[in-house]
Amino acid sequence: MPKRKVCAVLTMRASYAKIKPILKALQKHKDLELQVVLAASALLDRYGNLEKTVANDGFKIDSKIFMVLEGENLVTSAKSTGIGIVEFTTTFDALKPDVVVVIGDRYELMSPAIAATYLNIPLAHVQGGEITGNIDEKVRHAVTKLADLHFPSTRLAADRVIKMGENPDAVFFTGCPSIDIANDVVKKPEPDFDLYKKYGGVGAFPDLSKGYYIVMQHPVTTEYPDGLKQIQETLEAMNRFETPVLWFWPNVDAGGDAVSKGIRMFREISKPKHMHFIKNMEPQDFLRTLNRASGIIGNSSAGIRESSFLGTPSVNIGSRQNARERGPNVVDVGYNEKEIYNAVVSHCSTKKKSSPLYGEGNAGVKIADILAKTPLSFIKTLNY
């Protein structure tokens, strides 16, 4: 009997930590054939091109889809999605997968989700049912309604998917796959790499041995005209510290240019001696770095999801993660320099508070097993 072909779609650097455990489990499963498609910002150097990383990890890339238009505004996001629908349709028609797997809530996920649905290819969605309160939430729920199989990361998210009208027999609470990597990090926390030598970056090269902060702040699509002002508040707050800061560049969302501009202006004018700016890191390296950090500041889901399991204190800024389930490691603040500074001082000095909210570290194997055993005829005949 031929192996079931499972096509995993990866569209951005941050998603790799979440999907890599699934890729590994799919690749090892005796009844599955893994197909990998890289698309969107995952192929762009300025956002941390993942092509070499994915290949070096032993995964064959079956197709690459270039679909991102320059501009980083609402118009280019919409047009990039349209281009993606066309390109994913061509790719899926050529690869002929039995199931397509997408993860998360990025705007470009609409492209493979629509293409697979219109081609009558079963769609599996990881991390559905979560609430964040911005454009990501609309995309996430839209993909949920297009999907046939659901792998939510929390029990509450699973309940939401069912309440949206999805068949309970098609909803599997598995936990978040990125927690699989976080679990490995907890077991072996010591870093085995030199961050500056391996990843380069720009700015100062402060000594990280006595503690450091991580900052990851992305534009909020529904607030994108305010991105410059928002990042300036965070920059000024973090400039008040002497503790080293590892600052990651924003993603490709609308408003990303403004956020990047703010960081560059600050870096060139202030020349902070305690800040190092970096594009991206491999999942294991990033989570080891996050695990040893004094805290993570910004609005990345890493401060909510992986940090929850690791227990790393998280100062969440603004509305990007609004209403997403939080562990005890998270405190919320607004876009205000003084508020951010005070929260970092008070909250990042607390003890680690770990939580299994987003899983216990075995999601990848669970998802692969379900994808192998669930009859496709069952998916096509679900009664809603």
Image (cartoon, rainbow, N blue to C red):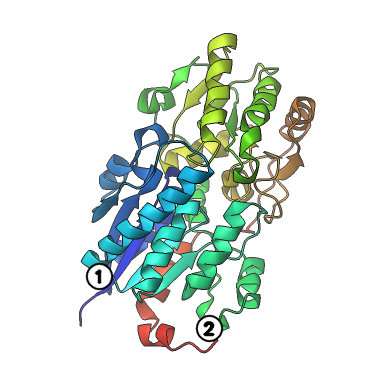
Q: Nearer the viewer, residue 337 or 73?
A: 73
Residue 172 position in % (x across, y down):
53, 74
- Disc 2 marks which residue? 169
Q: Secondary structure at mark 1?
A: loop
Residue 181 position in % (x across, y down):
46, 51
**Residue kind at label 1, given as amino acid type:** Lys
Residue ID at (59%, 21%): 244
Report the quarter where the N terminus lies: bottom left
Report the quarter where the C terminus lies: bottom right
Residue 85: tell me if it is visible.
yes
Would you identify the image quadrant in which residue 161 lies? bottom right
- Disc 1 marks which residue? 96
Residue ID at (66%, 33%): 226
Residue 369: tell me if it is visible.
no
Position of 265 with respect to 24 (left or right) is right
- The disc, 1 or 2, on the residue closer to the chain's N-terminal end is 1
**Residue kind at label 2, given as amino acid type:** Asp
Would you identify the image quadrant in which residue 68 lies? top left
Position of 191 with respect to 326 (left or right) is left
Determine crowd level at label 2: few under 14, some 14-19, many 20+ residues with C-alpha closer than 10 A. Answer: few
Position of 354 with respect to 184 (left or right) is right
Q: Nearer the viewer, mark 1 or mark 2?
A: 1
Residue 350 position in % (x across, y down):
74, 36
Location of residue 343 with respect to 43 vertically, above or below: above
Real-space Cα separation, disc 1 to disc 2, in angstroms: 26 Å
Position of 313 with respect to 369 (left or right) is right
Q: Nearer the viewer, residue 293 or 33?
A: 33
Residue 114 position in % (x across, y down):
42, 66
Kindly identify which numbered label has been placed on residue 234: none
Give the number of marks: 2
Would you identify the image quadrant in which residue 113 lies? bottom left
Residue ID at (35%, 61%): 8
